[in-house]
Image (cartoon, helix red, strand yellow):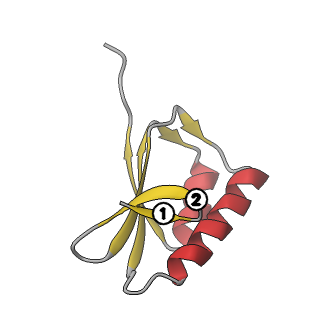
Amino acid sequence: MIDVAGKTFLTTADNAVVGVYPLDYIAWTRDLDQNERVISSAIEKLAGAKSKRLIVYGTVDPQARSVLESRGWSMIVKTIEPK
C-alpha cells in the first residue's frame, strides 16, 4: 500500500497504481475532477508507476467513466446486487 496525495492505493507487480473504492455511485463532479487531478499528478511523480487503475464496487456514471478513462484510468466496475 502507498499514499498518493493522502489516499491509500495499492501497487501491482506490473507497476500499476490501483485505487479500490466501495461506493454506491460515482458521478462526475467538480470535487471528483479536482481530486482526480491531484491524484494523477502525484502518480506521475511516483518512480516506476506505469498505469492507473480504479476498482469500483458500485455504479459509475457514464460521464465520470468517460472522463476518467480519457485521463488514463482503466476501470473495473463491480455492481453488488442486494441479496
Query: Badges 2 and 1: C-beta atoms under 8 Å apart?
Result: yes
- Quadrant of the rendered structure where residue 42 is? bottom right
* Structural crowding at the residue carrying mark 1, measured as other residues with C-alpha within 10 Å and reported as few (<14), some (14–19) or many (≥20): few
Q: CA distance from mark 2 to mark 1?
A: 6 Å
Residue at the image position 65 percent from the left and 44 percent from the top = 27
With 3 as the anchor, is 14 left or right in this view? Answer: left
* Structural crowding at the residue carrying mark 2, measured as other residues with C-alpha within 10 Å and reported as few (<14), some (14–19) or many (≥20): few
Which residue is more in the foreground, 41 or 52?
A: 41
With 14 as the anchor, is 42 left or right in this view? Answer: right
In the rendering, at what x and y percent does residue 51 appear? 40, 76
Residue type for callout 1: Asp
Residue 25: give its label: none
Secondary structure of residue under mark 1 = strand
Residue at the image position 68 percent from the left and 54 percent from the top = 32
- Quadrant of the rendered structure where residue 10 is? bottom left
In the rendering, at what x and y percent does residue 21 appear? 46, 44
Secondary structure of residue under mark 2 = loop
With 13 as the anchor, is 16 left or right in this view? Answer: right
Can I make out residue 71 in this image? Answer: no
Q: Quadrant of the N terminus?
A: bottom left
Residue type for callout 2: Gly
Q: Quadrant of the C terminus?
A: top left
Residue at the image position 58 percent from the left and 49 percent from the top = 62
Residue 6: give its label: 2
Residue 3: give its label: 1
Q: Residue furthest top?
A: 83
Can I make out residue 16 in this image? Answer: yes
- Say above or below: 72 vs 82: below
Residue at the image position 67 percent from the left and 59 percent from the top = 35
